[in-house]
Image (tube, helix red, strand yellow):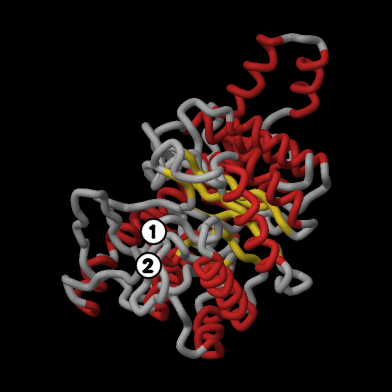
Amino acid sequence: MLIGKNKIEEYNQPLLKEHRRKLDFIFPEVKDVEGILKKLMEFQVAIPSWALGSGGTRFGRFSIGGEPRNLEEKIEDIGLLHALNRSSGAISLHIPWDIPSNASDIKILAAQNGLRFDAMNSNTFQDQPGQKLSYKFGSMQHVDKAVRKQAIEHNIEVIKYGVELGSSSLTVWLSDGSCFPGQLNFRKVFQNTLESLKEVYSVLPGDWKMFVEYKAYEPNFYSMTVGDWGQSLLYANKLGEKAFTLVDLGHHLPNANIEQIVSLLLMEKKLGGFHFNDSKYGDDDLTVGSIRPYQLFLIFNELVEGMDARDMHHSTDLAWMIDASHNVKDPLEDLLQSVEAIMITYAQALIVDRKKLSVAQNENDVVSAQEILQDAFRTDARPLIAEARLRNGGALDPLTIYRKEKVRAHLIKERGSKAIATGL
């Protein structure tokens, strides 16, 4: 379903007066407001192809209906999101869930929806139909060289699809690990994994990056072969300059200081990108900013400071993606909320008075440092986000348009109430 520019402008019209009033209030309070708006207009968050259908738990999955049945429909759904918020201009594919039948046609469809292809994602955490060997006891770590070779060949295949679509990066997340003490030899599985990753790395095109994603636990509960940022950094350093660490906010042990992790990875020039979500207990994959918004702000504060210290382009020098599971919400509504939360938090981080913060830090003025950060966090940045959307041709209130246009009802009518998205 497509919502055209004229329809969006029609919805925007009665909201403009109130929007201008809010904007007039915040403009004098923010330094370099035009510079901030420019950064907000440029910033894009990739939507993963697997997040467009209902998620699930170990206990059940409840389809919402009207879910995209193929890659073409997934691109159309993300195109709809991007038309509304103008900040969802990229799609991240998971292979083999989203193998393009005709790469040229898919590229044209993506371009028509204003989308580019973000990182390609491989899958060696599941056995696929017709697969010769099983990943039950690992993939790139496996004691059987034939299993490792199968995992390597799959990742190389994913790169080939990415080249056809115009992507320039590969994300490797491995569920490899162990559930019980003594199940495996830690040193041997590390070496097996490193050798496997090296084979994939060796065929990366010159302008590509490899992101090594870590996770503290699950599905293996005794050990994970890429279990934390230190292990991921170790792999990335051993692989070479095109390999980076990827941070998923839900892949940490409780109370981990993620903002410190990203600061150090940026300092070492080894932070590759982010998977955004939120959590209460573990890898809950909840709506971004729904549980720990201040933690998200502190992370973005370090991201902005670290990127500026290296003169990095905020939108393009790191990979930004949502990785969430929508178990009880309409996935498209959830994604609109997540992108909004990311943009608001990014704007708040841009508002931080860095000169004052640096002075407070150098003078050990702990109270002032806290006040400076919390002052930015408590700033209502929503008018700035809305203005950035408006200047980009988007909606002042994307979620309201989505609901008033009864998008989900239209999708159910078009695709059926039993339609289930490919993938998880």
Verify CB contact (< 8 Å) between mark 1 and mark 2: yes
Where residue 242 appears, as percent x and y from the top left, is: 75, 60
> Of the residues shown, which amino acid type is indicated by label 2?
Asp
In this rendering, does residue 91 appear at all? no
Q: Quadrant of the N terminus?
A: bottom left
The disc at residue 136 is 1
Picture residue at 40% right of the left edge, 66% below the top: 134
Is any atom of residue 83 visible in this view?
Answer: yes
Give the amino acid type for the residue marked by disc 1 in the picture: Lys
Query: Residue 298: image x %, image y %?
Result: 60, 30
Structural distance between the alpha carbons of marks 1 and 2: 8 Å
Q: Which mark is residue 36?
A: none
**Does 63 appear above or below 280?**
below
Q: Does residue 182 sit above or below 35 in this rendering?
A: above
Q: Is residue 334 left or right of residue 369?
A: left
Q: Earlier in the sequence, mark 1 or mark 2?
A: 2
Tell me the residue that label 2 is attached to: 127
Left or right: residue 114 compared with residue 125: right
The residue closer to the viewer here, 10 or 1, is 1
